Image (cartoon, rainbow, N blue to C red):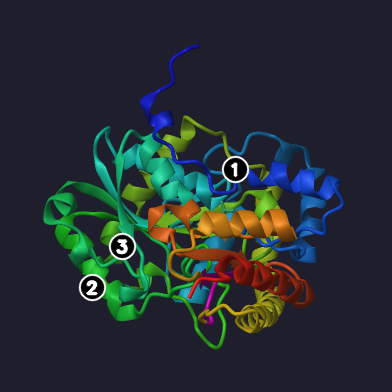
Amino acid sequence: MPKLADRLVTLPEYVLARVPQRKRELLAQGVDVIDLGPGDADLMPPPAALARLAEAAAIPSMNRYAFGVGLMDFREAVTTWMAKRFGLQFDPLTEIVPLIGSKEGISHLAMAYVDPGQTTIVPEPGYNSYAGGTRLAGGVPYRYALTPRTNFLVDLDDVPADVLRRARIVYLNYPNNPTGAIAPRDYLERTVRRCRELDLLLVYDNAYSELAFDGYVPPSIFEIDGARDVAIEFHSMSKTYNMTGWRCGWAVAKPEIAAVLAKVKTFVDTGGFMAVQAAAVAAIESYDDFVPRNVAVFKERRDAAVRAFRDAGFTCETPRATMYLWIPLPEGLPSAQFAERLMEDEGVIVLPGSGFGEGGEGFFRISFITSPERLAEAARRAGRVLQSLTAGVA
Ligand SMILES: Cc1ncc(COP(=O)(O)O)c(C=O)c1O
């Protein structure tokens, strides 16, 4: 057998890697599976995006390579939206990088900033492309455990000084997957200041910026003074517009930072399908009409999920953003065991906290991606498993 590269061997297993196969088997056995695993709702994209995709796909030039520049209309729609949404001006050509989903960009960015053996600061639990991108670049993630003690915020003052000195990147994601945490503005100000002092690239993953409730409006990192010097922000069409499968997002940063990500990408892809970029323009243009109604659907699901899981014997906070509940388990109950029993005995798929790294142990994640009725049914089944696993434990 050809020898594997060390970087491959060090990659953690993807938390969702084994689930689809097992789900297929359970469905084949006739099990009524409720899948609350992925952050992937059963909702449709904006109708205008569907129509634009069909139109655009029929235009010959749209079917050619997009290359790095892609569709100028997409860049302009993004900068127009960012001006309206955050009050921030960006140059469409030099400060936007079109992506084939934000995961792609987040993962590839480390190639530009991390040399073999160098360190990045990775929140754990956290989205897998932070540690994954670092590992693929030959770097070593410093795993920072997100806990209730810091309200699931990365406090750079907790990181040992020698790690901070060596680190090239800190990854932040608020609103946060999987904890649902949000970042107060004074925290962001402090963190930007520290990143500037340390010359640390702040990768701000804003995939959930539009999925917020109860009047909370997530900021862009660039609303914080000085962030343009040290930050790059990632946005996604996936969650805001229910377009996960389309693979479309963007990065935004000052030209010097945007250009290095664009450069890496010239060696790994040749741009996303331009008809998808055209459809993304239509989606972005439908923001005012589409997004508030879509968020209302998620809010109804959030409320139903919180209610049902509490009724079933769990304690959980009400998240002000994202599509996730991060639910604590009784002390000593391994999250992998709970998730396994829930899938095998009751056909409900949730993600064990340990699948997000050791820092996630003690919790499990559900995505509120299905109807309130199905969420309630999933919670009832989860409650039964909780009871059976804790029966006899004082
Ligand atoms: C925190 C976070 N960042 C980035 C992504 C990637 O989104 P996409 O690649 O679909 O744009 C996800 C998807 O689940 C996510 O949860």
Q: In the structure shown, which secondary structural element does the residue marked by tag 3 occupy?
A: helix
Which residue, as the protein is rendered here, is positioned at the far bottom? 215
Q: Give amino acid for label 2.
A: Arg
Label 1 near label 2: C-beta < 8 Å?
no
Q: Earlier in the sequence, mark 1 or mark 3?
A: 1
Query: Quick check: 378 left or right of 190?
Result: right
Residue drawn at 41 percent across, 42 percent down:
133
Question: What's the residue type where badge 1 is placed?
Answer: Ala
Q: CA distance from mark 2 to mark 3?
A: 15 Å
**Image-based side of 325 in relation to 197, left or right:** right
Q: CA distance from mark 1 to mark 3?
A: 36 Å
**Where is mark 2, residue-wise?**
190
Label whose residue precedes the other's in the sequence (2 or 1) = 1
Q: Quadrant of residue 42?
A: bottom right
Q: Which residue is mark 3?
A: 228
Q: Magenta segment, which residues? A: 318-327
Disc ID at residue 17 = 1
What is the crowding at mark 1: few (fewer than 14 residues within 10 Å), some, or many (at least 20)?
few
- For marks 2 and 3 on the same chain, the one whose residue lies earlier in the sequence: 2
Compared to residue 290, the image places residue 303 above or below, namely below
Residue 209 in view (yes/no):
no
For the stretch drawn in magenta, what is the main secondary structure?
loop
